[in-house]
């Protein structure tokens, strides 16, 4: 089974993890808990009327945990490297080999630079619409790909776009993550929406 290493545990990283894990690609999230969401209050996130950013992060973490994501809380990544057949992600304590890499480190672009990703004239990581960088199977999301246009819901969408591209590659066709009420009943035993 393919796996993806995700550096960053904000809306982009956790969204990528959720979509991948839910659909058969093992996801590991390295979460140093430095997300800007701890300074935010959400009034403009669709589906959420008004919620403190830290409370939202707790809900999102619980959601990815419920799908079995390997979430390494307080694990700061020190290095990422393309290995020829994937990526190696290192922390002070260990390393992980992965088939895919999603960078979701907010406006910190250091790992993307170290990896050799192309940058635009505006000094942001250059990505395609599916968030893929110039390095094959490496994706960049959120604030690292935008010049001062940062928004939690956009970041979550970037993470989802990266995950859907990874899933499309793995499945050999365009993949859509679209659930129905029957799926929810089957997956959650009729508890969805309660």
Image (cartoon, rainbow, N blue to C red):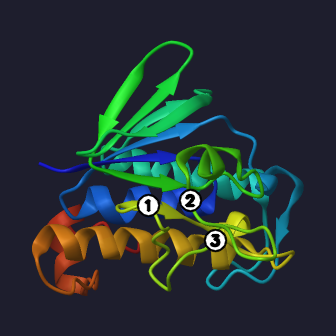
Q: Which mark is nearer the camera, 1 or 3?
A: 1
Q: Estimate the x, y position of residue 99 in percent, counting from the top left.
A: 26, 48
Nearer the observer, 25 or 127: 127
Location of residue 65 with respect to 45 vertically, above or below:
above
As rendered, which of 113 and 155 lies closer to the eye? 113
Q: Say which element carries label 1.
A: loop
Residue depth check, mark 3 versus mark 2: number of the one nearer the observer: 2
Secondary element at image label 2: loop
* Residue at 55% across, 52% down: 116
Instruction: Tell me if 75 is positioned left or right of 133 in this view.
Output: right
- At a point 70% along the width and 45% down the height, the residue shown is 110
Do the CB atoms of the residues marked 1 and 3 lie less than 8 Å apart?
no
Q: Which mark is residue 155?
A: 3
Q: Residue furthest top?
A: 93
Q: Residue 1, how many percent across, how many down?
A: 11, 48
Q: CA distance from mark 1 to mark 3?
A: 20 Å
Measure how far apart labels 3 and 2 are at the Cα level. Answer: 19 Å
Residue that carries the numbered disc 2 in the rendered image: 117
> Which comes sooner in the sequence, label 1 or label 3?
1
* Label 3 or label 2, whichever comes before in sequence order: 2
The residue under label 1 is 135
Query: Are circles 2 and 1 on residues that touch, CB within 8 Å?
Result: yes
Element type where label 3 sits in the image? helix
The residue sitting at 23% across, 45% down in the picture is 85
At 43% from the left edge and 70% from the top edge, which residue is drawn? Answer: 162
């Amino acid at each position: 089974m393919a796996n993806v290493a995700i550096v960053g545990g904000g809306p982009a990283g956790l969204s990528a993890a959720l979509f991948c894990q839910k659909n058969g690609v093992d996801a590991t999230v390295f979460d140093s808990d430095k997300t800007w969401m701890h300074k935010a209050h959400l009034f403009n996130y669709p589906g959420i009327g008004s919620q403190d950013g830290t409370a939202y992060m707790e809900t999102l973490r619980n959601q990815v945990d419920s799908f079995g994501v390997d979430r390494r809380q307080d694990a700061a990544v020190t290095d990422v490297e393309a290995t020829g057949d994937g990526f190696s992600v290192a922390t002070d304590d260990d390393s992980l080999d992965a088939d895919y890499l999603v960078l979701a480190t907010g406006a910190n672009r250091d790992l993307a630079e170290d990896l050799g990703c192309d940058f635009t004239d505006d000094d942001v990581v250059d990505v395609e619409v599916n968030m893929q960088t110039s390095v094959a199977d490496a994706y960049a999301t959120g604030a690292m790909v935008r010049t001062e246009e940062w928004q939690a819901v956009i970041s979550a969408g970037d993470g989802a776009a990266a995950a859907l591209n990874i899933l499309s590659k793995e499945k050999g066709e365009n993949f859509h993550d679209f659930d129905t009420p029957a799926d929810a009943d089957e997956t959650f035993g009729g508890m969805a929406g309660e």
